[in-house]
């Protein structure tokens, strides 16, 4: 099949001859296709898909007053408030990098840097951290 492809047989003809789909033929000869080399795709950036996470309301309130970059501010502004028990949760949809940035900006809630730690805020940051940490960048 690969030899026939190199002899300029069409993918459609090969698929008919072998009784398989065109996609199966493309997969079998992918390394022979000039437009689809593995080297070209190795340098392509890995795209992160948006992830929806629930951010505790105390962390969201702290971040609203913080100095955020444009992507972080947009994600926070587009979040949907969900009432839960006594407080609220902000459902934020963003790429994992933005979630990690927001988590980094919540660091003062743990205390230190001359800021008084409030147990409820510290817990809110820790809960958000537990939701963000499993988001890892998968490298193909």
Image (cartoon, grey):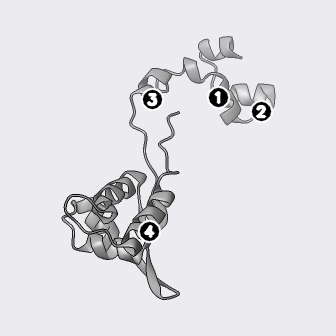
Residue at mark 1: 27
For the residues labelled 3 and 4, the Cα–Cα distance comes to: 42 Å
For marks 2 and 1, the one nearer the N-term is: 2
SS at mark 3?
Answer: helix
Which residue is pictured at 49% across the width and 45% down the height? 136
SS at mark 2?
Answer: loop
Instruction: Judge left or right: residue 73 versus residue 7.
Output: left
Residue 79 seen: no
For marks 3 and 2, the one nearer the N-term is: 2
Residues under numbered marks 3 and 2 in contact, where contact means CB atoms less than 8 Å apart: no
Residue 28 seen: yes
Image spot of residue 134 (x, y percent): 53, 51
Residues under numbered marks 4 and 2 in contact, where contact means CB atoms less than 8 Å apart: no
Residues under numbered marks 2 and 1 in contact, where contact means CB atoms less than 8 Å apart: no
Residue at mark 4: 123
Instruction: Name the front one of labels 4 and 2.
Output: 4
For marks 1 and 3, the one nearer the N-term is: 1
Instruction: Name the front one of labels 1 and 3.
Output: 3
Instruction: Name the front one of labels 1 and 4.
Output: 4
SS at mark 1?
Answer: helix
Residue at mark 3: 41
Image spot of residue 125 (x, y percent): 40, 65
Image spot of residue 94 (x, y percent): 40, 61
Instruction: Judge left or right: residue 28 versus residue 135.
Output: right
State whether residue 120 is above or below residue 45.
below
SS at mark 4?
Answer: helix
Which residue is pictured at 58% across the width and 24% down the height? 30
Residues under numbered marks 1 and 4 in contact, where contact means CB atoms less than 8 Å apart: no
For the residues labelled 3 and 2, the Cα–Cα distance comes to: 26 Å
- In the image, 6 versus 51, the foreground residue is 51
Give the numbered dot on residue 20: 2
């Amino acid at each position: 099949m690969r030899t026939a492809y190199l002899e300029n047989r069409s993918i459609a003809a090969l698929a008919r001859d072998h009784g398989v789909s065109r996609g199966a033929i493309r997969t079998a000869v992918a390394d022979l296709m000039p437009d689809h080399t593995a080297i070209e795709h190795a340098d392509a950036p890995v795209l992160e898909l948006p992830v929806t996470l629930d951010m505790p309301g105390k962390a969201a309130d702290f971040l609203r007053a913080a100095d955020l970059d444009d992507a972080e501010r947009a994600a926070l502004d587009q979040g949907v408030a969900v009432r839960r028990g006594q407080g609220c949760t902000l459902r934020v949809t963003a790429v994992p990098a933005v979630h990690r940035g927001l988590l980094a900006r919540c660091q003062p809630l743990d205390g230190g840097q001359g800021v008084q730690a409030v147990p409820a805020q510290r817990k809110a940051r820790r809960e958000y951290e537990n939701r963000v940490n499993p988001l890892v960048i998968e490298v193909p």
